[in-house]
Amino acid sequence: MMTNSDNSPLRKIKGGCLCGAVTFAVDNAFEKMFLCSCDQCRQITGSAFASNLFVRIDGFDWLDGVDDIANYQVPGRDISKAFCRTCGSGVPWENSDETKMIVPAGSLNAPLNVAERFRIFASERPDWASDLDQISLHAALPQGLECQAKLPLPTQHTIGKIMITCHVTYKLDPAKTPDFEIYAKAWIPLVARFGGTHHGYFLPHEGPNDLAFAAFSFPSLAAYEVYRTKSAADPDCKAAYDFAVKTKCILRYDRHFLRPILDGNLSGIRSQ
Ligand SMILES: [Zn+2]
Ligand SMILES: [Zn+2]
């Protein structure tokens, strides 16, 4: 990884592609940065937005690998995708009037001096990137999420892969339902932390006022056992458990392990 301890504006910094075939040097004095969520940038990056820096062309030099670059010009737009033929990393390209280089910010490995940043084409931002500040933030890939990454949350396409659902019936002290609600809310992210999918807690509304239910799924009984072991050593899980003990909101609970069927169709009855 390239580093640059000197962060002064005119110092040249280096960038390049992941495999190292393409390298360049550029003045660390960028006029503008566009974080663009337009449909073309979404598709061309495969991500929520493109992060492009603009710099005068005379402040830019290729060092190596120009012949390794392929280029795709988006028809009708001043958008190109220049990329390394070997590793596919985005690399810089010239704008149409050849006055500026557009440098993908991620191709640089140094702190950047950028005069001004703009988020553009927000109206074309995909739903899944509309509230990034609401998404849980982790310094690295937390334990348990690795497993979740391979076994995504249930959708029409993946629900068949969830093998075990734990259904819990709680007998509550009705006077302490508000405490139980605090306890319940804590476990929803904790189950996710260890690779499970929480389907929610269901608290009394009408009918018996001392029964509540919860359901959450794991990819297998073995994964559930891993969750049981790891959660026993997790400080947040222990705090949630201690909270229930201290408040005595749960009088007893029963667990059932079930095989979920979450996707439906009519083909079975129509073939009769
Ligand atoms: Zn490369
Ligand atoms: Zn765009």
Image: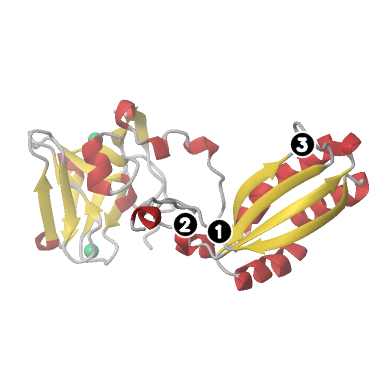
Q: Which residue is mark 2?
A: 159
The location of residue 49, given as percent across then percent down, is: 32, 40
Closer to us: 132 or 197:
197
Marked residue nearer the N-terminal end (1 or 3): 3
The reply to whether dot 1 and dot 2 touch (C-beta < 8 Å) is yes
Residue 186 visible in the snapshot = yes
Q: Where residue 197 sits in the image (x, y, percent)?
A: 58, 54
- 55, 102: nearer the viewer: 102
Q: Amino acid at mark 3?
A: Pro
Residue toward you, 42 or 65: 42
Q: Is residue 159 above or below residue 213?
A: below
For discs 3 and 2, the disc positioned in front in the rendered view? 3
What is the C-alpha distance between the residues marked 3 and 2? 28 Å
Q: Quadrant of ligand 2?
A: top left
Residue at (29%, 62%) from the top-left corner? 18
Q: Say which residue appears at 26% left-offset and 66% top-offset.
A: 20
Ligand 2 neighbours mark 1 (CB distance < 8 Å): no
- CB atoms of marks 1 and 3 within 8 Å: no
The residue tagged 3 is 204
Q: Give the residue drawn at x 9%, y 62%.
A: 67
Indicate the secondary structure of the residue bearing disc 3. loop
Query: Which mark lies nearer to you, 1 or 2?
Result: 1
Marks 1 and 2 sit apart, C-alpha to C-alpha, by: 8 Å
Question: Of label 1 and label 2, which has the lower sequence position?
Answer: 2
The answer to whether residue 233 is seen in the rendering is: no
For the residue carrying disc 1, how many other residues have a C-alpha within 10 Å: few (<14), some (14-19), or many (20+)? some
Number of other residues with Cα within 10 Å of mark 2, as a class: few under 14, some 14 to 19, many 20 or more? some
Rendered location of residue 101, percent (x, y): 18, 41
The residue wearing badge 1 is 260
Secondary structure found at label 1: loop
